[in-house]
Every structure is written in C-alpha cells, then in structure tokens.
Amino acid sequence: MPDKEINILIAGFGGQGVILAGNVLAYACIDAGKNVCAMASYGAEVRGGTAKALISISDHEIDSPIIERPNLAMIMNAPSFIKYIDTIQPGSPVIINSSLIDSDKIPKTKHDVVKVDATNFAIKMGNIKVANIIMLGAMIKKTHILEPQSVVNGMKRAFYKGKKGLYYINESAFHAGYDLI
Amino acid sequence: MAENNTGSDTKRVLMKGNEAVGEAAIKAGCLCYFAYPITPQTETPEYLARRMEEENLIFLQAESEIAAINMVFGASAAGARVMTSSSSPGISLKQEGISYIAGGELPCVIINVVRGGPGLGNIEASQADYFQSTRGGGHGDYRCIVLAPNCLQECYDMVMNAFDLADYYRMPVIIQSDGIIGQLVEPFEMHPYEPMFEKLPPKDWALTGCAGRKPNVVRTLFLNPPNGLELHNKKLDEKYKKIYKELRWAESFNCDNADLIIIAYGATSRIAKSAIKRHNNNGKKIGLFRPKTLWPWPDIELIEIARKNKGVRFLVIEMSMGQMLEDVLLSLMDVVPKKDILFYGMGGGWNPTPDLVYEKISEILNK
C-alpha cells in the first residue's frame, strides 16, 4: 500500500449495506495492522434514503476523522453518484454498481470509473444483499489497498455475531467480485 | 457494530466511541447504568443492554432522562458505581438531578455526546455544551470534573478514570464527547481496568442499611442555623480548589517556538491537527494546545506556553460560537494581549474541516 492516507467514500441507499461494507474494511485494516478511522451517516437515515460511510486507512496516525476529499470511492446507486462524485479527487478510482447506475446517463467525469454489475450478480448468487461485498471484492482487486486475505479475516470478525451462513455467502461474494474485473 | 471483542485480554479492538465508553464502565466496576435513548449516543444503552445482562449487572432504560438521573442519585447514595449517558437536550433535563448529586457530594459518571442546540437542535456533532458542563448547568454553586476525549483510546481510558475521580472526590464527573467521537469507529487497546489511585476512601457515608451503626444521611437541604448552607458551600469550594491544584490535564504539540498556537479539544483538536501538520510540512511554526480536562481548565499549563513563546498568537477553534474561548481569555489576560487571541468556530452542529482550518491559519499568517 502506498504511504499516503487512503480516504474512501462508500455510498448508496439505506439497506444496501454501505455501512456494513465500511465496517468490513475497518476490520480488515485491524487484521492488516493498519490504522483506520470510520465514520458512517447516522440518525435520520432510513431504508431507501441515502447512506454513506467514510473510511481513512493509513500506516501512520490518523488525525482528522472528517474526510473532505476522498481519493477512492465505491458507489452503489445513481442518486449517490450524482450527489458525491464532485467531492472525489479527480483521477481517483470510482467503483460503480452498473446494475443500478446507467453509465450512459451519468455525467462524464475525470475519474477512473470501474463498472461492476454487482446487484445483478448478487441476485444470481441468490442474495441481493451481498452486492456490497461483491463491490468490495472488485475494489480490492482494482486498488490493492489491502490483501484479500485480510478482508476475508475482517469478514469473519464482522459476521461473527450473526449467523455463520452469512459469513460463507459473503466470502463467496467477495471472491466473485474480485474475479469480476 | 461491536463484535465479540469483550474478552479480558489486552488487544486492539474495533468499536464505536459510544460502545467503548460502555465497555470501559463495565471494566471499571459500574454496577448500575440508567439512561434514555437519544441520537447520537444511543449505541451506549444499546451496547450496555446486552453486555450488562451478560455480566449480571443492572441495566435499566428509564422512562425519561429525569428518571434516569434520579436513579443515578439513588444508586450512588447506596454506594454503587453508577453511570448515565445522554446527548445535549437530555443532559439539560438531567441538570436538576446533577445539582442534587453535586450538593449531596455523591460520585457518578455522566456521558454527554454533545449535539447541535439550542432547543431540540439537530443530531450533528457540536461542542456547544461547554458552558453547561463547566459552569454547573444546574442551580447552585457547584462544579463537575469534565474530561474531554479526542479518540477512542481516551474514551475508554477516561471513563475508567472518571469512576475513580468521582469516588475519590465524591462528585459527578462528566465525559464530554460529541457526535463525531461517539459515532467514530477506530481501533483501541482494550486493556483491563487500571485504577488511578492506590486506595480510594471507604464509602462509609453510603446508605447501606444502618443495623449496628448510626444512620447515614445524604443531605442536599441545609437548614441548620445559623449558616449551615454557607459552611457546606465553603466545604465544596475547598474541594474544588484542591481539584484545581491536582487535576489539570493538557497536551501540547509543536508549541516550542511557535508563531501561532491552536487551542482546541475533542474532535476539533484532531481536525485542527491535520491542518497544523500540513502547515508544519510547509515550514510554518504552528502548534496545538489541547485541554483534556475542561474543568478544571489547565490555565497554568497554557500560561507557561505563552510565557515561553513571546509574541505568539493563539487561535481558539470550537464547534460553538465561542465558549472555551472565555476560559482562554481568562487564563491569558495577564500574559497575552487580547488582540492576539483569535477565534474560529461553527455553531448549529457544523464542524470545521481540515481545509477550512488550513485556510483560516493561512489567512492569519498572511495578515
């Protein structure tokens, strides 16, 4: 991983697992021995509304928990793309969920846009909810910010308290996303 | 979000700030927790609802904030380690109870995850309860010790300290968190409870049933003539003076030979530090002074820094329209001209960003 701080925006509508994806990343950072700081939207968000998570990853001390200009993004739906794209540093990788974002209809930007047909692929896998982890797999493949094994270990911790079955389908989703691009 | 990381071993765990304070309370021997939900602190009761039952401790979601603080009053009078938490409007409701607890010289821990105000305000992070926490808040001449963490490690450590300080000095201790620190997820070391004092005074004043001894009375009403209440206030005042001597916590960063020193606490201090480091990288001499106790305020520590840096200017940054600013002005009144103490703040639940602080510093340096 490069020396500079990675500031990641994950956005989508409430229910798409935006915050969970951020938590998985945070756990993965613990596994990798990196510093991490995550802030998610809270309070007035409801299913169907917009939700976002901001995660800083660094080998050094992280000062500000407030991220202004993310240099990596994972965007799960079209309204979030329109809302946040201008906040992301030009040239940064932006992983978009092309199942819900029609790339012909969104404005051209100076970002390195990577299309992942995540929601459709999640439906094929039998659980629409794992679209977030498919996206995460693609993001890790594209950017190499963390070793895939760290993310898998992070998922073990994130899904520990829930049903074990959730862990297995999410692990498959992660590898599927990793292989999609 | 807390996973199964509640074991007793020291290890790096991941939690929300609001969860870390809950776990710290359990580790510090908190027997009872009473609270009512409010954003952005609800993760604390959510977390403790599960964990206190696991540990066979007492968790009770009260019917209101007022009920919760009076349950704290009762449990504390009975000698228990007890905690409550809320956010700004809820803390306002608790003020009558806090005044009684302070008057009765009872120990307790109160967490305020500050949000925007006044009134119902909003749910965003704020520091606008500084006056409320440090100036009393409720009626009467009293103080609370106020600790201000700026990271999750401090959330965890300071809650443990808070229980010890409350018992040692017999008074309420407030943890001044905010919507950013409370909602923040970052790793910290979950070490076992480390007592601050070798020995705490025995709670021989507690109402534990008086069979075989004289009854104890916890009193907030002093009608004994001719000047019972005055004497009680004098006693409290002596205690507060002792605390001022013994407990002023602050941290400084790059203050030696600085041209400008930022003064900030809590989440704001971290936002400021990002901007300061960017200026430092460009060769600018900018420092940071961060009070960790908001009461007592570390004035002597700040004065020392001002004396060492002749001609230095100060910039106070807060998520309020200028509350800690008053303590800075009072501390430096004999040392630094008033015109050299500047302020930058945002109210209504808006936080400054590293970019905005960076620009503000540039603007000051270019003047």
Image (tube, rainbow, N blue to C red):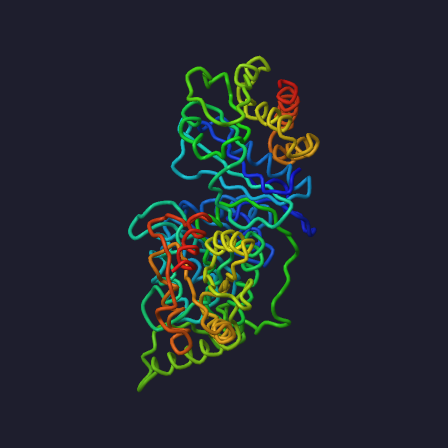
Locate the N terminus of chain B by quadrant. top right
Does residue B126 sit above or below A176 in this rendering?
below
Q: Residue furthest front?
A: B366
Seen at 42% across and 51% down, the residue is B359
Locate the C terminus of chain B by quadrant. bottom left
Give the total of numbered labels. 0
* In-image side of A52 versus A35 (left or right): left
Q: Nearer the viewer, residue B194 or B276?
A: B276
Q: Nearer the viewer, residue A149 or B307?
A: B307
Does residue B296 sit above or below A156 in this rendering?
below
Does residue B168 sit above or below B85 in this rendering?
below
Does residue B69 sit above or below A157 in this rendering?
below
The x, y position of residue B78, in whole percent, is 49, 65
The answer to whether residue A139 is seen in the rendering is yes
The x, y position of residue A44, in whole percent, is 38, 37
The x, y position of residue B252, in whole percent, is 54, 65
The x, y position of residue B107, in whole percent, is 48, 66
* In-image side of B247 versus B322 (left or right): right
Q: Residue furthest top?
A: A124
Seen at 38% across and 50% down, the residue is B115
Q: Residue furthest left?
A: B119
* In-image side of B194 versus B240 (left or right): right
Q: Nearer the viewer, residue B156 or B167?
A: B156
The answer to whether residue B97 is seen in the rendering is no
